[in-house]
Image (cartoon, helix red, strand yellow):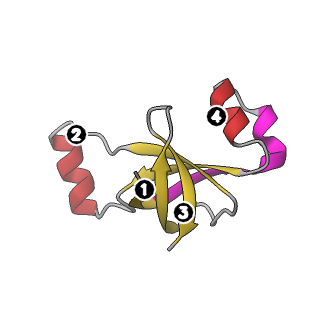
Amino acid sequence: MPETLHTQVLAVVPPEDVDDHDLQPALRDLASSRYVLVCRKGGAPSWLERIKSFLLRDPIEAVTLVADDAPEEGAEFTARVEETEMVGVYDVLREE
C-alpha cells in the first residue's frame, strides 16, 4: 500500500555506481538503472529533536529509497512510496 514519506537525503548512489557498492542482491536488482537514496525518515531534525533523540536513546530512522531521479545530498525529499519485501527499502512511485 503506497504511503507518503518525508525524508532528508544523506547519500546518493547513481545507477552507474550501484555495482561498486556492497548491496543485497534484491536491492541491486531493484536499482538496476535507478538511483539508491539513503535517507533520514522524517526530514532534517531540529537541534531540539536531535538532543531529545540522544537523551532518550531513540535513534533517527534511516530508510533506503530507489528512485528514477535523485535530489542532492542534504536536500529534503517528499515522495509517494511503496514498501518492498526488504525491510526499510521503499520504491519511489512519484515525487511530491
- Circle 2: element type: loop
Name the kind of residue labelled 2 in the image: Asp
Q: Between 27 and 55, which is closer to the camera in this rendering?
A: 27
Q: Are marks 1 and 4 in contact (CB under 8 Å)?
A: no
Q: Helix or strand or loop: what does disc 4 sit on?
A: helix
Q: Amino acid at mark 1?
A: Pro
Instruction: Give the label on residue 2, or none.
Output: 1
Mark in the foreground, 1 or 4: 1
Q: Pointer 2: what residue?
A: 58
Q: Give the CA distance from mark 1 to mark 3.
A: 24 Å
Residue 58 drawn above or below residue 26:
below
Alpha-carbon span between mark 2 and mark 3:
22 Å
Residue 27 located left or right of residue 63: right
Q: Earlier in the sequence, mark 2 or mark 3?
A: 2
Q: Mark 3 and mark 1 in contact (Cβ < 8 Å)?
A: no
**Residue displayed at 80% across by 33% down:** 20
- Specify the label residue 74 is tagged with: 3
* Kind of residue sitting beneath label 4: Leu
Q: Residue at x 50, y 74 (%)?
A: 96
Residue extent of the magenta highlight: 8-20
**Is 88 located above or below residue 78 in the figure?**
above
C-beta proximity under 8 Å, tags 1 and 2 = no
Marks 3 and 4, the one that precedes in the sequence: 4
Which circle marks residue 27 in the picture? 4
Q: Earlier in the sequence, mark 1 or mark 2?
A: 1
The mark that comes first in sequence, 2 or 4, is 4
Q: CA distance from mark 2 to mark 4?
A: 27 Å
Residue 14: say if magenta: yes
Q: What x and y, as percent, mark residue 58?
A: 22, 39
In the rendered image, residue 38, in percent from the top left (x then y), is placed at 55, 47
x, y percent for residue 69: 69, 63
Location of residue 95 in the rendering, given as x and y in whole percent from the top left corner: 55, 69
